[in-house]
Amino acid sequence: MSLRGRLLRRLALVLSILLLLGSSFAYWNARRAADTAYDRSLLSSARAIAERLYDEQGELSVEVPYIALDNFAYDITGRLYYQVLDLQGRSVSGYEDLPGPNEDVPMTQDYPALARFYDADYRNTGVRLVSLLQPISGGSSQGMAEIRVAETLEARERMARNLLRQSLINLGVLAASALLMAWLAVTAALRPLQRLRNEVAERRSDDLRPINTTGLQREVRPLVDSINHFTGRLRENFERQRDFIAEASHELRTPLAALKARIELGLRSEQPTDWQQALHEADASTDRTIQLANRLLSMARIERGARAVAEGSAELIEMAPLVQELALAMAPLAHGRAVALALEVDAPFSVWGEPTLLQELLGNLIDNALHHTPKDGQIILRLRAPAVLEVEDSGPGIPQADRDRVFERFYHQSPEGTGLGLSIVGEICRAHRANISLHEGAVSGLLVRVSFPA
């Protein structure tokens, strides 16, 4: 469904409702105008009859003039009835069964006459009547005579329908003109969106430049700004992935080339001792390559976990049991290297995160500490308030100048490392909006502090 079509349909619905309301008011006004016009004619006919009343030997008589009934001669669709009542309410002339007004019908205020207008049914047909009181004085008669004139409603309804039809034609033309003008206005207003659509459609799949917002409406600009922000993040992610792939290819090429060279050197030799040495060196090189590959897989797993955290699938994780479980799992490795591994829980806390990533974070910190802690050294894991995790070792530490670079990918101080351990830790901290910092240990070595959002 297009935006233009939706706007026009809703505008058409609004105009239809207004047209319906306008038609109702138009019919009501037309009927009122017809009643006003025909009521005046009814009263004129009643007055014409009242002027011909006379007293004949004490009895009221009337000569109904043709002009009294001729007011409606131009309209052959309706019928006219009349009745004249004398001072005692007896029928003198006309239709004797013509209905009279109820007592609650008020006198009209629209005309200077003692007249009442009312509706009734006469001969199974709806009629409009006027009851005119005519003073009679002189001779032996003195009082009020009543003249009733009735008219069927066909002429009034036809006049109201004609007025309504004309009003509907005018309103319909007005509504159609409004829709046409609205269509032209919406088309002109959506022209920048059409330009935006063409600009996006003509782009290559790898073109993530920001969209130009010049000429866009104020309501559309926030959407385009959000799209530009999103494409900016996509561009950063693609650049990071491209750099990562290039660096990973370089890092993998070196140990694989060294492994192949050692194997070829052993194959050229005819001494079993050379073969054995080549196999040992190949085994060590293979271990480092496997470790590097595992770290690369960890980086890919971090990307998926960070996406899960960003999409709202994080869990509330108790850090004390998680750290205790991982410390128990790493204890045999620490014991084998003659390193003491301790856990201090000053204040347990919980964090929103992905448990696999948090285990990866802590495992890399402990592994990095074990790698740099000498024999008979110690590693201390701490949980402090408000939501701080610390890993402190008694190793040589990291110089101040290198502390910012250790979180870069493939940066390592010793040739045995992969340069991905602390880089993985940094990525996991960013995914959990945690702050990581490096400090001097209490005695010596390195203190790594990870502060989670409280």
Image: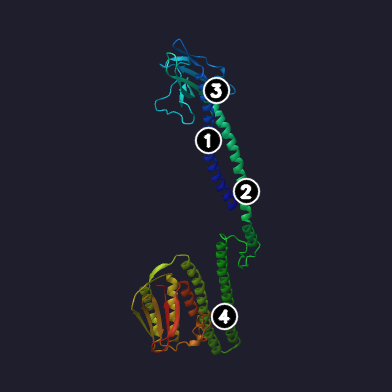
Q: Which amino acid type corresponds to the residue marked 3 in the rendered image?
A: Gly
Q: Which amino acid type corresponds to the residue marked 4 in the rendered image?
A: Glu
Q: Earlier in the sequence, mark 4 or mark 2?
A: 2
Residue 191 on image: x %, y %: 64, 56
Spatial CA span between label 4 and label 1: 89 Å
Spatial CA span between label 1 and label 2: 29 Å
Query: Would you identify the image quadrant in which residue 19 lies?
Result: top right
Q: Which amino acid type corresponds to the residue marked 2 in the rendered image?
A: Met
Q: Earlier in the sequence, mark 1 or mark 3?
A: 1
Q: Which mark is residue 78?
A: 3
Q: Which residue is mark 1?
A: 29
Badge nearest the viewer, 1 or 2:
1
Q: Disc 3 on helix, strand or loop?
A: loop
Spatial CA span between label 3 and label 4: 105 Å
Badge nearest the viewer, 4 or 1:
1
**Mark 4 nearby-residue class (10 Å; few <14, some 14–19, many ≥20):** some
